[in-house]
Image (spheres, grey):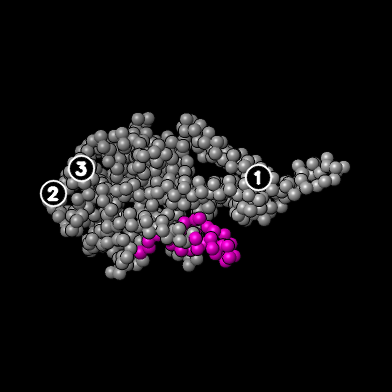
Amino acid sequence: MGKKKSNSAKAAQLMESSVAPILEIKYKDPLFSVAAHPTRPIFISGLATGRVLCNTYDAIKLEEAMEANREEVAKLDKRAYAEGKIPHVTKSVSQSKNKFWTFVKDFPDADSTVESNTTTNWQTKRHKGSCRHVIFDPRNDCLGEFVYTCGSDNVIKKASTESGKVVGKVDVNEDSKEKLTKLCHSTSHPFLLAGNEEGHVLVYDSSNLSSNKLKFKVGQIHDDSINHILMMPQSPYHYLTLGSTTLAHIDIRKGIISQSDDQEDELLAMSYTTDELSEGKTDTVLVSHGEGIVTIWKNSKNKLMDQLSRIKINKSASIDAIVPTMNNDSEEMAHSVWCGDSDGLLHRINYKKGKVVETRVHSTVDERSEPVDEVGVLDIDYDYRLISAGMDRLKIWSNKEAEEEEEENESSDGEHSDSDDGLGGSDDELELSGSDVSSISDVSDIELDNTDREEEVSDAAQDDSAENDNDETPPAYKRKRRDFSQVITKPKTKSIDINKLTKQDSEEKDAPQPQAKKQKTKEKKLTTKQIRNMQKHEHGIKRFEGL
């Protein structure tokens, strides 16, 4: 069923990153699960029909094709704008009328991957019902060699990644009503965990699945189905589980070690942080919620009994997936995780700063009123590329920092425009200047908004974030405001009436303000303050929504 675009989704698109996907695959049948190979360009898809597919992609060629097509589309848009055929040149990836990345439609038809730099290695009808979850073997001695799937038929199967041939399976037939939901495998031992809809966790020996022998069982961990299972690397017997409104720490031999307080909100997914994983630590856990927030937990603080702080992401959507960036090349990426929400948006949040630092659009409502593809799965490929998937499509994103490059280009263009004649700049620059003149209060509001969002994180992180905002935001507004004033007052310097010179000087000082207000009434773009308010729903009748 279709879903209307929320105000938060509209606001997020206005702040969209310029990073684009290199591959988009639209599936014929609903997509339930995706897993990326840890060391190779391979991904596995599990469908609602029970089919499982293994695909290889050429990331280098896909990246090159995307960049070349993007340059061509940009040239065509600039030409069309110069000829007056389009009102403006958009840099938005999601709003581009021409998809400059590789697009595969009606997958997995036989001809759908022709000339797409993707190959279907194998596909098979693996389960009688739907394929609910798929994972690769994470053990170092057989990393990615095997793939495990579970279906609504309550069967777990182990297959070779290369051939797709089944090498072991177990029929979980204790109760047909207790359908399997999630899988997890130990990184060091042959322990395969399966969570079900009744809140139980079953443990099997992955090296001998065909024996159908249950190794361990932890019952009634949660009141509802198991939403996520996460291994604690310190011990092959210790795991974290999410279900209903609680987080639990379990020992598969002894049972529940601790269970969190009731969070009064469904807990959907969780992840560790990249910086701690690289150091062999897993003290910090980030948990996504049904009410559009991500909470921060620390085992060393309170044994994971309750959240310590929260980060607001999207009030109108649930955060259904979360994954660490796994990229430790920079401090910014090491402190970040990716989140996917039910509005079809992707958010990179810096948990140290306590805020969203990048937004991408996985799916949006288009002119044909296609429903939003809610992001239900996130993964990171072998080269740290983000993979996002909903029930309709899968996207593999570029890992190039295209956003920074474009910002530098915009900055250099602005400097050249300042050195030219006053009105030689683009319409976009004039509109921005007009809306920014006499907007010091807007800048203050932006800083206050950022501070409000960061109050729920640690004081140290808040101070760092506030300093960054104060350093970065005001200079841009001041530069634009000063240049626009010079453009307006320039003609008045031609006056030669000495008797009226004093009066004229006072008029020059007052001139920019009326002109700025007049320009502002023509402004069609939303101010940053309005965008922030749209995200928070703090304007108009929205304040009383839900009462």
User: 161 or 18, which is in the foreground?
Assistant: 18
Magenta stretch: give its range.
75-104
Q: Confirm whether the magenta stretch covers residue 301.
A: no
Residue 345 seen in the current view: no
Q: Amino acid at mark 1?
A: Asp
- Of badges 1 and 3, nearer the viewer stands 1
Report the predominant secondary structure element of the magenta stretch.
loop
Residue located beneath label 1 in the image = 483
Of 211 and 339, nearer the camera is: 339
Q: CA distance from mark 1 to mark 3?
A: 59 Å
**What secondary structure is found at the residue carrying circle 1?**
helix
Q: Which residue is mark 3?
A: 140
Residue that appears at 83% across and 42% down:
501
CA separation in Å, label 2 and label 3: 18 Å
From this view, report whether residue 301 is shown above or below residue 374: above
Q: Amino acid at mark 2?
A: Asn
Disc 2 element = helix
Query: Element under label 3?
Result: helix
Q: Residue at image x 28%, y 55%?
A: 43
Q: Earlier in the sequence, mark 2 or mark 1?
A: 2
